[in-house]
Amino acid sequence: MSAEVLALTLRAEAGSRSVRAIEALAALVVNRACLAAEAPALRTRFAPGLRAGAGWAALLAEACRAPFLFRCWQPGRLRAEAPADAAMEVCRRIAARAMGGALQDPTEGATHWHDGASLPGWAIGQVPTAEIGGLVFYRLPG
């Protein structure tokens, strides 16, 4: 089920984009999960619902569902069923690679992102680490 949470996140947030962009977003989730695993203070930000003793798959799922980090997990945003389309299958394959540690990080350790068509207030003055498939990635301090 945890791989499905990651796949649903990827599909909802970047499913219409290139495979490279979807992979970059999956790498960002992995980056957040790694930070949450390493530092208890960051766990509060990137995986607040994580239970003691939870494994890697649960950590990735919590990194997807952390409040305010992905629009699709805000109340009322995500459909209960995964769409049965080619994009969802691509997202499932990418999620499986991320779960298995076989996904490279083209974002240079990014922990934040936004659609390149907009510029949220938090991104003003920040230097992106990567721009991939219309998504802009950042590694913010702290």
Image (cartoon, helix red, strand yellow):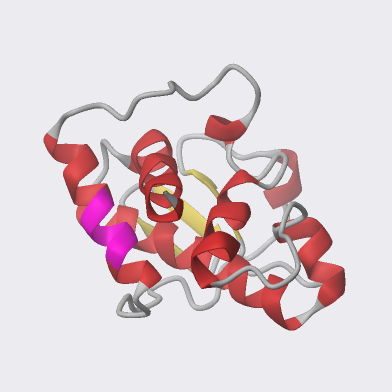
Farthest front residue?
Answer: 53
Which quadrant of the view contains residue 125? bottom right
Residue nearest the observer in this picture, 24 or 63: 63
Look at the image and tell me whether residue 138 can be seen: no
Where residue 7 appears, x then y in whole percent?
A: 36, 47
Residue nearest the observer in this picture, 120 or 113: 113
Farthest left residue?
Answer: 86
For residue 14, above or below residue 81 = below
For residue 126, side relative to residue 9 (left or right): right
- Please name the residue shown 64% across and 69% down the image: 139
> Quick check: is 7 in the magenta stretch?
no
- Please name the residue shown 58% across and 33% down the image: 73
Where residue 20 appears, x then y in whole percent?
A: 26, 60
Q: Range of the magenta residues?
A: 92-96
Residue nearest the observer in this picture, 51 or 82: 51
Residue nearest the observer in this picture, 136 or 21: 21
For residue 2, side relative to residue 64 (left or right): left
Farthest right residue?
Answer: 41
- Please name the residue shown 43% across and 38% down the image: 13
- Please name the residue shown 60% across and 40% down the image: 119
For residue 96, side relative to residue 112 (left or right): left
Where residue 70 appears, x then y in whole percent?
A: 58, 41
Look at the image and tell me whether residue 107 can be seen: yes
For residue 42, above or below residue 47 = below
State how many labels appear. 0
Which quadrant of the view contains residue 95? bottom left
For residue 108, above or below residue 90 = below
Main secondary-structure element of the magenta-colored stretch: helix
